[in-house]
Image (cartoon, coloured by chain):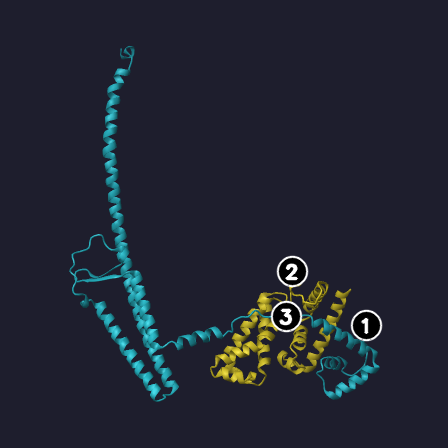
Chain colours: A cyan, B yellow
Amino acid sequence: MTDFSCSYPDREAVLVGYLYDDIEPSERVAFETHVTVCLACRAELAEMREVRTSLAHWTAPAPRSHQSPVTSHQSSVAWWQSVPVWAQVAAAMLVLGVSASIANLDIRYDRGHGLNVTTGWSKPAVQPAPQTPPVDAAPWRAELTAMREQLQTEMRAQTASVRAANTSPAPVAQAAAMDAEVLRRVGALIDQSEKKQEQQLALHLVQLQKDLSAQRTGDVRRTNQLLQNVMNTYGDEIAKQQRQINYLLPAAVPASQQR
Amino acid sequence: MTWSDEELVTRSIGGDAESFNQLVLRWERPIYALAYRTLGREEDARDVCQETFLRAYRALSGFRGQAKFSSWLYRIALNLCRDWVRRQRRTPVVQLPEDVDVMELAAAREPTEAIEDVVARHDLTRAVERAMAKLPEEQRTAIILKEYHGLTFQEIADLAGCPLSTVKTRLYQGLAVLRRELGKSDQ
């Protein structure tokens, strides 16, 4: 290994500073002068430069393009905010409507049996005699109507506020607060609807369980009947065969044995 | 119009997410390279890079501008790298598979470059990686920040929380180790 012994003051720090050109101009000049006469410093400087040349070969791979940590979040918020409130309400109602239609809900209200919810795939085999009161009298219908009216009121209020904002520029904060309020109400309505859906689903599940139980009982009864029929048919046949065997058996025994 | 880092930070604090995205685009590559050279694994570097910007975004309101934004970002990244190494108990700095993928090398070749030159370049890269892995963490960090990120001695001292003279000593000693290790690989 090369011997770099030299007594230049603060040599290591100055050498590194000179190597990276991060040094005071006066120090630079002084060291440059020294290097011309100092073999050790010149040699070490050359070797350090070689090391730096080697280091330059170590390139980091390019980062694979990844999403900015805020892009996805911000863009989703922006997307949500860019949709008009009335469209958000409409979308919520559409989701509820589609959910109900997928479940093929058949909701009946009977004074004797109370609220009865069934679906297309779990309708009872025998429908009870229709004692349903007029459909408009059903509580859920009234609630739905109330909800629809409430939504219409909200939408009218929203439209009016938008018009007002167009004619006289309201402060942005006020508009944002209004939007937030409408969104909150829509959220509350959706929550309410969700709860109702959950209740209906629970009723539906109970009904489904009843249907399955009835089906199972019927199946068991039919199976027992079938088994009974089989026993009746083949039981007679077996008894007949037994009688024939008993009749034929004495005739088949030799006379010597009979004696 | 090109905004300065500090202007973009101010706009980001004001709620302009696009400004922060510009900062990410501007500093993603250096931060990723810093993490890669410190940790030695692309996926770890990617995770640290992502986490760095996430933390920066969360703490943006606390950025007072006493230091440059880039120095602040480097500090977050270096802290994460340090935590990462401790948590994962991995030996930092590149652990490449021993076998050389000739097809990959050929693909990395410049149009005018002979395959022998590509192999030589690859060998030199490996030698540098191995030599860097021999350095203590402080020396390695100082060399990475100086050599590949062009930070001043003072900026490195601020990041490392040590005197300026210590940074110069670490650099000198680190370069001396590299000179010895690279000399060995030449033989």
Residue A32 in sight from this viewpoint: yes
Q: Answer few, some or many: residues within 10 Å of disc 1's Cα (few below 14, many 20 plus, some between 14 and 19).
A: few
Residue matched to label 2: B103
Q: Residue A21, position in %: x, y?
A: 72, 82
Dot 1 or dot 3: first in sequence order is 1
Residue matched to label 1: A2
Mark 3: amino acid: Ala
Mark 1: amino acid: Thr
Q: In the rendered structure, the residue with mark 2 lies on which chain?
A: B
Can you tell which mark lies on residue A60?
3
Q: Secondary structure at mark 3?
A: loop
Q: Which quarter of the figure has residue B66?
A: bottom right
Q: Residue furthest front?
A: B112
Q: Residue A228, position in %: x, y?
A: 24, 37
The image shows residue A19, relative to residue B46, as above or below, that is: below
| Callouts 1 and 3 close, C-beta under 8 Å | no
The image shows residue B16, relative to residue A248, as above or below, that is: below
Respond whether the residues carrying marks 2 and 3 are from the same subunit: no
Q: Residue B67, position in %: x, y?
A: 59, 84
Mark 2: amino acid: Met
Q: In the rendered structure, the residue with mark 1 lies on which chain?
A: A
Q: Residue B49, position in %: x, y?
A: 56, 72
Q: Answer few, some or many: residues within 10 Å of disc 2's Cα (few below 14, many 20 plus, some between 14 and 19).
A: few
Q: CA distance from mark 2 to mark 3?
A: 19 Å
Q: Quadrant of the N terminus of chain A?
A: bottom right
Q: Is residue A209 left or right of residue A57?
A: left
Q: Is residue A34 left or right of residue B26?
A: right
